[in-house]
Image (cartoon, rainbow, N blue to C red):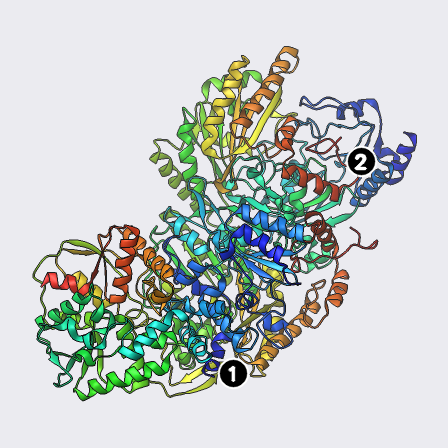
Amino acid sequence: MALEQYRDTMLGCTRCSYCKWIPLAQIKSWRFAKGCPSIEYYGFHTYSGGGRLTAALSILEGRTGYTDEARDLFYQCQQCGSCDVTCKLCLFNMDVAGTLREVRADLVEHGQELPQHLPAMASLRQQNNMLGAPSAERGQWSEGLGLKDLRTETAEVAFFAGCRCSYDEGLRNVARTAVSVLQHGGVDLGILSDAEVCCGSRAYSLGYPQEFDRLARINTEALTKAGVKTLVTPCADCYWAFKRLYPEKAGATFEVLHVVEFIDRLLQQGKLVFTKSVPMTVTYHDPCHLGRQGEPYVPWNGITTKAFGNITKHVPPKPRYNGALGVYEAPRRILNAIPGLKLIEMERIREYAWCCGAGAGVREAFPDFSSWTAAERITEATSTGAEALVTACPWCERNFIDAVAGDGQKMKVYDLVELVQHAI
Amino acid sequence: MTEKIAQLAAIVGRDHVIDDLATTDAYSRDQSFAPPKRPSLIVRPVNVDEVQAIVRWANQACATLIPVSSGPPHFHGDTVPTAAGAVVVDLSRMKRIIRVDRRNRIAIFEPGVTYDELQPELAKEGLRLSTPLLPRRSKSVLASLLEREPTLIPKYQWTLMEPLRCLEVVWGAGSRMWTGEAGEYSSTDLAEQERLHRAAVVGMGPANVDYYRLISAAQGTMGIVTWASVKCDVLPQLHKLFIVPADSLDRLIDCAYSLLRIRLGDETLIVNRAELASMLGKGPDAIKQLKAQLPPWALLIGIAGREFLPQERVEFQQQDIAEVAGRYGLKLMPAIPGAEGSDILQRLLTTSRGASWKLDYKGACQDIFFLTTLDRTPQFLTTMRAAADALAYDSSDIGVYLQPLHQGTSCHCEFSLPYAADDPAAAHQVQELFARASNDLLKAGAFFSRPYGMWADMMYRNDSQYTRLLKNVKGLFDPNNVLNPGKLCFKP
Amino acid sequence: MALSKEIYAALAAIVGTNNISQEPAVLHSYAWMNGNELATKDRSGFHPILPEAVLLPASTEEVQAIVKACNRYQIKCKALSTGWFEPAQALQKNVILLDLRRMNRILEIDEKNMLAVVEPYVIGAQLQAEVMKLGLNCHIIGAGGGCSPLASATAVIGNGADSIFMGYSAEVLLGMEWVMPDGEILRTGSLATENGWFCSEGPGPSLRGIARGKVGSLGSLGVFTKCALKLAHWPGPRKFPVEGTVPAYNSPLPEHIRTYTLAFPSWKDYADAIYKIYDAEICYIAHRQFSMLGENLWPAFCTMYIDPTKSLDDLEDIVNDPEVRRLTDEVRHYAFQIILAGMTPRDYAYQEKVLDKILADTGGHRVAAMSEPKMEKFVALYLLKLPIKNLNHVYGNGKTNYFRPDGTPDFAVERADQMIAVLKKQEETGLLPKTGGDALMSTITGIGGGGDFHFEQFVQYQRTDVASINAAAECLRAAGRVGLQTQPGRLPELEGLTGQEYLAALAKVPQAVRYNWQWKIKRMLDPNGAADSTAYTTLEPTTDSGS
């Protein structure tokens, strides 16, 4: 059982509760001190990173069995990774995020699938997307953009729209604007169009690794065949899949960039210049999968040994995946470079940002929890005095837009590329 | 009675069982308006074994005991018996200063020790003990601390129990224990504890109960304390006192808060002219004259230079305090009309002249005191004055003493009401004023944390949970109600 | 005894069905605590006893209703907030747990009188962030900013790095609200007579003394639902600066706030310096912190930690760096950390001069390498916020400690070498991290103004390795044996004794009468046995017990 691989992490929980908060050093107020949406919403300790480790261990050791409530509690988590970051402040060899993912795979393996995810998984198997839409319509968002079709042509740079941008009519504009900006910067782009399949990120985080493998194989083969050297995407979820999972699990070798990284590069190279003023006060939301989880995969095939008698040591040193190498600066450089734009930071940013609420199947399965999480973030954004919340992930945007509408709040929500478009 | 005397004489020796009328009469009343009641005997033990034997005797004989450590005059009625036939346990013979430990700054002494006896011994070791405001000569140090009398240096008050630490106590039930760190494991021999570097520093405990808190402000109703350890200050090598005068109390409040917040200064207290005149003046005429000269209000700030760079400390603090005062349009003065800072300091560092400085002005005095926060004191002053005006008491005679406590978080507020001792009408007036003002102050939010006399009725009425639990605690430590019955909320 | 449907329904009616759980996975998550593995036969981190249910009350009224229900139905309850220690579990059968996380508000901050009123689930870091906006600070216990100041003050222990300036948790406790085990509510101090929160004593005898002593009741005597805490001045920036890449956060602070490591030639000089610091009234923070990571390792560890590209995997290389070796020797044994914080510029200058004199008198010095900017900024943030105290467990996720008895600095240093020898010997088995033997941590004082000192010898072990856990347990037993020799009258170690044997040993300890009183107090406060009081030691009095 693969869950067994994470026994050490489960045993390693010291019950410190750091997983419930942002790093204590970064707490600036009572209100925005919390890091874990799940325990804030559901209350019991079990709903924290540490609590789930212990609950998983109780299953692994046969002390408890699979019940509906136990299953649900593992799915009532966006897998935002906040707990992983704070745990690793002190405990170097924990893999909380990995354990939480693995326990879902274990649940699925034991027939404990979450009923609310079945439609999305069926859609994925049948139509290769999470949103129940026909795969034949996947490329429609790109009409009129003059993009190369990588089914038949080759290009060095592939634009990967992702399911959300492809099918969410309210967010197709994000993909179109991103392409437009990159083209303005002289980038020669291609897309897989209808041949693009879901990156598989959600399948992986919902506990369906084989489904991920299937999708990853399709995408990797198609992109490799098309001669792609660089993949760029506007979606943080896709970014995480391609950056962290594809190299290890699908042997992908192309460079992976988020659109904000590409735009940042173009700015530094002088290929993109901001000429128009965008007089607006904004605050920036770090998407979980671009920020703390947006770290590159670093292959490690070393050995585990001991130092000083009984301290675990890895040779060579193992990559930490603690959020240090996430994409934080690029979006901020871009925003600060836009004339007339003022960026005010929220209290919870970067590796300790609060989640948008959409991730890991929560939006699909527990909509109230998902929108509560988003509303929390909107409240935090509003507290800065900013008039707009800017981010770089369509899943975040969709959740924020719906939360603003639902709550009657006034906060505008933008994808970063939309502001860039206004500035060029 | 004869049997009683014989039984007690077997414990303390016949010479120390006193039943003459003059002595029992002296214990039957005090300066307060508590109804007089004559004790049957006074017994004077000299050590804890005798105290314990007395308490055990009282339990068997169904007698009541009133522990008294200080000499007269007493002011609060707590040493006046409520029950008939009470035996006063006069602890003034217990005068041992058991230890002065410079390194840990701990002194251990018995209840009969006064400030005038203790301070010189401490000074030999380079130590000094914070005192309340001008304690009388006969005041027992231990009793003062047990009753939570406020001391003058707020920054050293880590709790309102300071500087009291460990105790040896004989409970009303007759058993004995050491409280605080002294009651943790280790030996029950103080010298052995010292050898092991256990210095009776921590007053909390032992274990999961703060026994010294249960005995504090108990007016002798829980147990009889036979020694205490206290945390001393380092003796100043240089010590100055400055005054910040003002026309009104309001002007001093924020300045005082600023100083307390950053722990500038040592002694920190606010007095009005009537209070300061009484503190300084020798006799009624001098007091009257001073009242006319002194500014209406004065914030008194002591600055001490102790072991490390004393001169520098005094100098920089003086400059800093002057700057703080300046921010509020006030001045830090070494002297004011009628008084030099050095004279005031001298008064603060010594015990009261005569029986008590409070009696110097008119021969008698009643004090109303309670706890609050410094910012609310002007409001209480208004309440007090209103009560005085309503009863035609001259408010210019009211002495006001504000003592910031607990590093500035609370404040002891005291109103002194002098009156002519030999004037029954004046006494009656003050008695009425005392009652009326106490009620008015209570309604305005005064917290009578040391509930003597009528304040006990005010604090413990309505049979609150606090009262209920306090009675249960009394039932644990003094199940037969041997110790000072009728005080606080305990039945007579 | 499982909860009957009737009892469950009664409890659910109080808190709402979403706020009570009997789900086995939930119950197990509340029976997990670091340290359990040292006591369980199978070295499991799960306590052998599960709670019957876990409840999430939202208010004092709900807490009271629950406690009264426990009295009525003859079940027991135990409350916890952040719950980072063994007593925060059901320690006997038939216990329901009250997780107080919904009671998490800061109710009031009175800047002028320097106090804050909090509920149980406000953590130190939250309170500190809010009061620093006003130029104030709050006492943070040694276990760090992730713990509950209310729990520390009302029910646990309470020393911290800042105790020298701010005091012990029990010393900053003001008025409090307590749901007693019989379900009645006691309010103490000025709160008892509805006069506000500012005073914890009285009226008259101070009944907060029944609630806690040097140590609190550890969750054993009802539930503390609100309290006020005394604050202190913070002379630093109201927006506390934090920079750096995770995990190497650090804080550049103004020049009148300086962080030093002081090193001395011997234990005697070390103790002398501590006494002088007490007398001189300097220091905002005084803590022997990093020694917990071991004399051979701590300078290397700090060097590693402030470089975000490094990890524990690099520790061996860093230890062997010549500069780090020099530093390690310089601070071996006789060193601790302080922060000087000037209330005014002149005050700061004075404190530095006084420190110079103390160091001259005791042969000590400021350790230059620890004042390198990167290191100093890291240490400043660490000590002022104690935000990463789970480093207690860094080497192997397991940690215990011995040699806690509080006392004077002289008491502690006299026994330090013996205590170091115990760990050093055990480390030779190779089953524990080879720290060198001196992993003695301490707050330089636990109480305000100084005087109360202790050493806490850290024993870290590999949580995933039963042999390592066994070695740690053996280390505790060995320490207990040495402790009994060096600390006459010390409490017997629990390890290896049955409950009855332990009580019998306890009864022979001098002044065990304090546990007889606690037996009586427990019966007085909890006539129906509605509180899980396993952590509250009691001894039934006999005719010989002197109470």
Counting from the top left corner in percent of width and height, residue C333 is at: 52, 70
The three-letter amino acid code for the residue at tag 2 is Arg
Quarter the C terminus of chain B occupies: top right
How packed is label 1: few (under 14 Cα within 10 Å), some, or many (20 or more)?
Answer: some
**Left or right of C66 on screen, residue B297:** left
Could you tell me if residue C198 is visible in this image? Answer: yes
Counting from the top left corner in percent of width and height, residue C509 is at: 74, 61
B338 versus B117 height, above or below:
above
B328 versus A233 height, above or below:
above
The three-letter amino acid code for the residue at tag 1 is Gly
**Left or right of C457 on screen, residue C487:** right
Q: Check residue B44 in the rendering and tell me which mark sits there, or answer none.
A: 2
Q: Check residue B257 in the rendering and tell me which mark sits there, or answer none.
A: none
Q: Please tell me if label 2 and label 1 are on a single chain.
A: no
Chain identifier of the residue bearing label 2 in the image: B
Q: Quadrant of residue A99?
A: bottom left
Residue to which mark 1 is pinned: A309
Element marked by disc 2: loop
Counting from the top left corner in percent of width and height, residue B439 is at: 57, 24
Chain identifier of the residue bearing label 1 in the image: A
Residue for point 10% across, 69% down: A272
